Amino acid sequence: MHRKVIAPSVLAASLLLAIPASAASFAPGAPGLGDTYYPASGNGGYDVSHYDLRLKYQPATDLLEGTATLLATTTQDLSRFNLDFGLKVSEIRVNGVKAAFATSGTQELEVTPAAPLPKGKTVTVVVKYAGKPSELKVDGWTAWHRTPDGGVAAQEPDSAIWWFPSNDHPLDKATFDVSVSVPDGTQAISNGVLQSTSSKIGWTRYNWRSNKPQATYLATLAVGKFDITTDTTANGIPVLNAYSKDLGDNAGAARASLERTGEIADWLSGYFGPYPFNALGGYVPNVTSGYALETQTRPFYSPRQFAAGANTQVVVHELAHQWYGDSVSVDNWKDIWVNEGFARYSQWLWSEKEGEGTAQELADWAYSSRPASDPFWQVKPGDPGPENQFHISVYDRGAIALQALRNEIGDQKFFTLLKGWPTERAYGNGKVGDFVKYAERVSGKPLAKLFDTWLYTPAKPAVGPVAKAGVRKGSAATPWSVTKPAAQPKSWKKIAETNSVHAH
């Protein structure tokens, strides 16, 4: 074999050719993605395609050690870029070379590579870190839940900064491999499909994979001692549910609810189209919080969601999010209605299916049971503000808006919309305005007035013309009439038990 020797001058010249001529084009990536409510969330200058997280967690001390490998592509000429992260970092390498780094603000990790990164370049970033997530506070709170036998990462609008560095905004989705080593007798639950497990000197490693694009806040981790059940849906999707062994009185109700996950997902697919992922399930850790969250493929449920008994309504809500929220995610957090209004309306459809009140009866009750003076009507579901992002108005008034739309365009076009939106925008993002335009295109009707009335007007809409002969009739703004207080549907109590579903 003859090895060709390259003269140093020739090598230097070839390297110079690989660098853009204008050094002035290199600039730091933005420290945020421009979200209206959370301007510090996410980062500019690059797009992540995959996260590989190799972790070790000790429940006794809450010590998390990790190596995160991010595969990304630059979207501009970068002199520096940011990651969102809060734990202590010991080393960062960019394309195999050590990079300088510093922290700023509450979550910004500023990374300066040894050489500038041209636009369109594939980049590998490796971050080594360690810390106790429960000790990290951002604006006085933590998304990391300590449990009697471990810890859990599940929170909205973000939880990633407590356990892995990321571009922490729904606009930058990626696939995930999450490998977690925990003491023998303890399990690690995450998103997607469990690929394998292995044991080594008192520790067991669990390897999970999510093979479809996933927003960072939808990534989850739960370490503890669980009872695990497995099944397969009628449509062939594997189901894995996990329950903390110490749930106490809530254990039976939790199981009676989550074990219907496959059935409910198959039912929802009739409205929303084929289930968008290759795994399904949920988990109930022994946490003190009261909410639930649509963590992708494996929703998180607080035990308190089942304190009053079994409740399939919360399962319906979180599974509906797999289409509306996970597969199609918000473009900006002000667009939260395209998540929550539809998840709530899916609960109303479940009520119809169970014979416990139609969606129209639930809309009538939600409308008539709240007087015009109720602050409920002051919140605009289409842009509620960060302080009201998970206000009950986003859910109930947001669902009324969908019933108003259904009445205006008819069942055939309405249910075409429900299935078409998550099909057309699968694994992407969407705004409220995008949905309005889509609804107008599919229905062939001008609908701006209807959406403005129900999503953007800080007042209780007036009722429309009185219906004749029991047939509902109204204008585009008020497409039905409520002439007297409606009767409370049978399902309302169980639905109301889920009102705290995202109240953190």
Image (cartoon, rainbow, N blue to C red):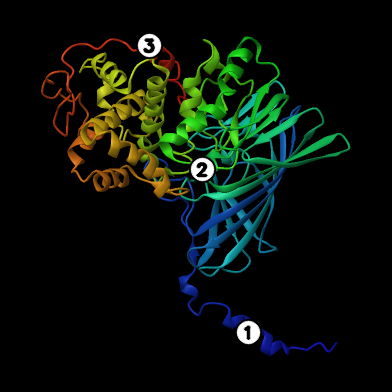
> What type is the residue that disc 3 sits on?
Lys
Q: Secondary structure at mark 3?
A: loop
Depicted 403 relative to depicted 236: above or below = above
Mark pair 3, 2: CA separation: 32 Å
Q: Is residue 170 left or right of residue 187?
A: left
Q: Position of residue 231 (x, y in %)?
A: 65, 30
- The residue lying toward the viewer, choosing from 60 and 456, is 456
- The residue lying toward the viewer, choosing from 465 and 414, is 414
Mark pair 3, 1: CA separation: 75 Å
Say which of marks 3 and 1 sits in front. Answer: 3
Q: Position of residue 423 (x, y in %)?
A: 42, 46
Instruction: Specify whether residue 290 is in view.
Output: yes
Name the image quarter holding the N terminus.
bottom right
> Which circle marks residue 490 in the picture?
3
> What type is the residue that disc 1 sits on?
Ser
Task: Give the residue drawn at x 56%, y 48%.
Answer: 212
Depicted 108 relative to depicted 410: above or below = below
Q: Quadrant of residue 410?
A: top left
- The residue lying toward the viewer, choosing from 332 and 274, is 274
Say which of marks 2 and 1 sits in front. Answer: 2
Q: Residues within 10 Å of mark 2 (few under 14, many from 20)?
A: some
Q: Is residue 99 left or right of residue 494?
A: right
Depicted 9 relative to depicted 392: above or below = below
Q: Position of residue 484 (x, y in %)?
A: 18, 11
Q: Which of marks 2 and 3 precedes in the sequence?
A: 2
- Disc tally is 3
Q: Secondary structure at mark 1?
A: helix
Instruction: Specify whether residue 380 is in view.
Output: no
Mark pair 2, 1: CA separation: 46 Å
Look at the numbered discs 3 and 2 and tell me whether their residues touch, using CB distance below 8 Å: no
**Circle 1 sits on which residue?**
14
**Circle 2 sits on which residue?**
276
